Amino acid sequence: MFGLNKTLAKFCDLKGKTAIITGAGRGMGKAGALKLAQAGARVVVSDLEECQLVVDEIKKQRGEAIAIRCDVSKKAEIDSLILEVLKKFSKIDILVNNAGIFPFEPFLQMPEANFEKVIDVNLKGYFLMAQACAKEMVKQKSGSIVNISSIAMGQVGVGFVGLTHYCASKGGIVAMSEAMALELAPFNIRVNCIAPGAIDTPGASAIKMTDQQRSAMLAPIPMKRQGRSEEIANAVLFLASDESSYMTGSTMIVDGGWVAG
Ligand SMILES: NC(=O)c1ccc[n+]([C@@H]2O[C@H](COP(=O)([O-])OP(=O)(O)OC[C@H]3O[C@@H](n4cnc5c(N)ncnc54)[C@H](O)[C@@H]3O)[C@@H](O)[C@H]2O)c1
C-alpha cells in the first residue's frame, strides 16, 4: 500500500494515536504526515493553507487524516486548531513542529521586523504549539513532541551566511526542547529534536543558487547529495513512536555526515 519503508512503519506502530504535524502541505512536513499515517496514526495535516491534497493522498493509501489550516505564529489559530482536533479525535499523542521559514538576508541590512517574523514562526510557533499540545498530553500522562531544528542550530561547526534570524531560531528550538523535556518527563511526555542537513524540498529548491554555489554546498557533505524528505520522515517516525521510549531532550542529526566532516 504505502511503498517506501513499510517495515519501519510496522516496527514503529502508531495505531490509535493522534498526530499533529505543522507545515505539512509540502516538503518534509508532507513526507512526515504520509509516514505517520503509514504507521497507523490519525494525522492532522496543518499548514498556512488547507492542505486537502495531502489528506487525499493519505486517504488513497487507506490512512486516516484531516486538514486544518493554522498559522503557528498566531495563538488564537492554534487554540482553534486544538479544539477542532479534540472534537474530532478526543486526544493528542504526537506533535511534530515542522513549519518553518528561511528567507536569506544579510545581517547588517536585516530589519527588526524580518528578524521578528522568523522568530515568531520558527521559535514562538513551536513554543505555542508544544504548550497547547502538552496541556492535553499531561492529562493522559503520555506524548511525544518532535521539533524540527537544523544543523544551523550552532555549535556543530557549520555556519550559514544570511540566516542570522534562522540560526537563532533553530538554536533556540534545541535549547527550548531540552528545557521542555525536563519539565515534561514527569508526565511521560518526551521532547526531541531533529537537525536535518541540506534536504531537497520545495522550500530549499526556491533558494536561488548557481550550479557553482550548489556544488560548493554539496562539497562538505560526505554523502555528496541532498537528503530526501522521506529520510527525515523516518527519523520523525522513530522519535514519535514508543521505539524511542528512552530518548528525551535529544537532538538527532540527519545530514549525510556534514557536521562529522
Ligand atoms: N530543507 C532543508 O534543507 C532544511 C534543513 C534543515 C531544517 N529544515 C527545516 O525543516 C522544516 C521544513 O522545511 P522544508 O524544507 O520542508 O520547507 P518548505 O518551505 O518546503 O515547507 C515548509 C512549510 O511550512 C509552511 N509554513 C510556513 N510558515 C508557516 C506558518 N506560519 N504556519 C504554518 N505553516 C507555515 C509553509 O507553508 C510550507 O508548506 C522547517 O522548519 C525548516 O527550517 C529544512
Image (cartoon, rainbow, N blue to C red):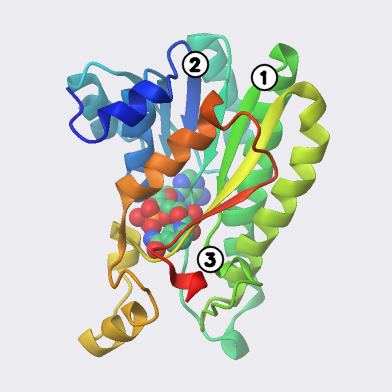
Task: Identify the secondary structure beneath mark 2.
Answer: loop
Q: Is mark 2 within 8 Å of ligand 1?
A: no
Please tell me in which quadrant of the rendered image residue 164 appears.
Answer: bottom right
Indicate left or right for 179 with 82 as reference.
right
Residue pictured at 62% horizontal, 43% vertical: 192
Residue of label 2: 17
Q: Nearer the viewer, residue 215 or 244?
A: 244
Q: Residues within 10 Å of mark 3 (few under 14, many from 20)?
A: many
Residue 5 visible in the displayed image: yes
Q: Residues within 10 Å of mark 2 (few under 14, many from 20)?
A: many
Q: Position of residue 152 (x, y in %)?
A: 55, 69
Residue of label 3: 151
Q: Position of residue 236 (x, y in %)?
A: 46, 40
User: Is tag 2's residue or tag 3's residue first in the polypeptide sequence?
Assistant: 2
- Work out whether 27 lies above or below 8: below
- Work out whether 245 lies above or below 127: above
Q: Is mark 3 within 8 Å of ligand 1?
A: yes
Residue 74 visible in the displayed image: no
Q: Position of residue 206 (x, y in %)?
A: 29, 68
Residue of label 1: 142
Q: How many marks?
A: 3
Residue pictured at 74% horizontal, 20% vertical: 138
Residue pictured at 69% horizontal, 59% vertical: 172
Query: For the residue marked with disc 2, what is the amino acid?
Result: Lys
Quarter of the render that holds ligand 1 = bottom left
Query: For the residue marked with disc 1, what is the amino acid?
Result: Ser
Q: CA distance from mark 1 to mark 3?
A: 28 Å
Q: Nearer the viewer, residue 100 or 197?
A: 197
